[in-house]
Amino acid sequence: MPGPRRRGRRSCALIALAAPSASAWTGCWPARGRVEPRVASDARMVLAMRPSAPAALGSSGADVAEGEKVGVLLLNLGGPDTLDQVEPFLYNLFSDPEIITLPGAVRWLNGPLAWIIAKTRAPMSREGYKQVLDGGSPQLRTTLAQGAAIEAALSTRGVSAKSYIGMRYWHPYTDEALAAIKADGVQRLVVLPLYPQFSISTSGSSLRLLEREYYQDEQLRLLKNVVIPAWYNRQGYVHSMARLIASRIDMLPEGERAGAHVFFSAHGLPQKYVQELGDPYQQQIEATVSFVMARLRVLGYSNPDTLAYQSKVGPVPWLQPYTDEKIKELAGGGVSSLVVVPISFVSEHIETLEEIDIEYRELAEEAGITHWERVPALGVEEDFIEDLASAVVEALPRMEQRPLQEIDEGRPVSLRVVNDLVSLRSKEEIGAEYGPVRVRNYRRVGFTPKAEVINGRIAMAAITVASLSSYLQGDLWDVIYNGRIPFEWF
């Protein structure tokens, strides 16, 4: 397995984060460990900060007619509420073809393979949830609070709206949210994934599921909608992150503050998603770090920083450097204080409360780190919530448009064209009507046959190796019967 790649210090003198009144924000493009000014003619996305509109500017209600019902659909991953729900939650997770993608000929194996993985991982996952989460994930509670806060912020902008929650892998599922939206008679719907950065495996998966269910319903197809696909480059989000980091730096002993290392830990992703499928996640994560660090310097903090990726599973290479390896490397280089930032998370869950707070902290202390501060997830931070409300207000007028801008600009787009904006895996014919036209043999672009073959070969090779290992040990049928096929690397 390749070792961690050293990442240079990020700098971008052209990002004017200190000027919230500026009408234009200069973007950056990451290359070879640092961020360079972006050239619009040859870059794939605009990595530029977007200023937040003050609440007063939204007081007109964004052209919402009096009495018109507005809904805001918050999309998130979801998590088990009790220990008994851990295994079915894992099954839902691993049966998603964007988590394990098999070629069409063997796609029927997704279910059985997900069942095996869920059976194998459930005991370990239950221990994690039991240890730090009082038996369940706090994600739903946080998302409910975020929805209520966004409703209140929209009210100050003259928009009366109701929030709905659609989780990808646990209750309340997307179809439950859509049923509530129909029952309430919503007339305009803003879809807001609670993932700051776009990825095929997170926002993309949720949006594909939403699209399928949305346009198969005759009533919902008439509902005006708009999607905010990414918001990593919004000023309120960046400023909130920077302020929380600064507060944690200030908690360190005075002698440790100036040299404390700001350690950004983002959820990982297999490298092939970025290199072969064009997933914009890594570029957006690196841009986010650049924006946040630039803002910290404006606030008077000149601390060094590092970006690494956590939660790797499986034998294939993921985005690097890996969090655990980078912690040990920094400690070996003399770093004694870490301020750890879960950069891609806006609510606490097992990856922050157990993986970062317990596993990585223990690793850091063993490696020689003497001071550790972890920045909390944003939750209902005021500037963050106000910024999401501003994004909703800005999106409302776009329901009358069909823009074809890249989602990396974080600009609102219609659900009808979201699959034209990002390379996604091909979809089966769903036999749904798109407006007045009956669509047949409709296919999404993206996830090419080559990509599907690669995924399928990896999965089949894993099954073969695991089965051969058990066969050579003479206990193949026992492990199958007990659900213990050695898929721990999943």
Image (cartoon, rainbow, N blue to C red):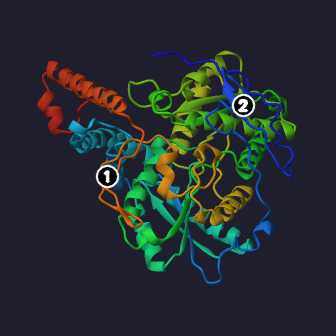
Q: Are marks 2 and 1 in contact (CB under 8 Å)?
A: no
Residue 256 found in image quarter: top right
Would you say residue 260 is visible in this rendering?
Answer: yes
Residue 112, quarter of picture: top left
Q: Earlier in the sequence, mark 2 or mark 1?
A: 2
Q: Is residue 367 above or below residue 50?
A: above
Q: Helix or strand or loop: what does disc 2 sit on?
A: loop
* Circle 1 SS class: helix
Report which residue position mark 2 lands on. 39
Seen at 14% across and 22% down, the residue is 471
- Say what amino acid the circle numbered 2 marks: Val
Q: Position of residue 310 (x, y in %)?
A: 53, 33
Spatial distance from mark 2 to mark 1, Cα to Cα? 47 Å
Q: Position of residue 392 (x, y in %)?
A: 64, 62
Q: Can residue 81 be seen in this snapshot?
A: no
The mark closer to the camera, 2 or 1, is 2
Q: Amino acid at mark 1?
A: Pro
Q: How many marks?
A: 2
**Measured from the top left, where is residue 21 in percent x and y?**
86, 52
Location of residue 341 in the rendering, given as x and y in whole percent from the top left corner: 65, 39
- The residue where tag 1 is placed is 88
Mark 2 neighbour density, 10 Å: few (under 14) some (14–19) many (20 or more): few
Q: Is 480 on the left or on the right of 372, as rendered?
A: left
Residue visible at 76% across and 55% down?
Answer: 52
- Name the one closer to the observer, 290 or 261: 290
**Quick check: 248 left or right of 20?**
left
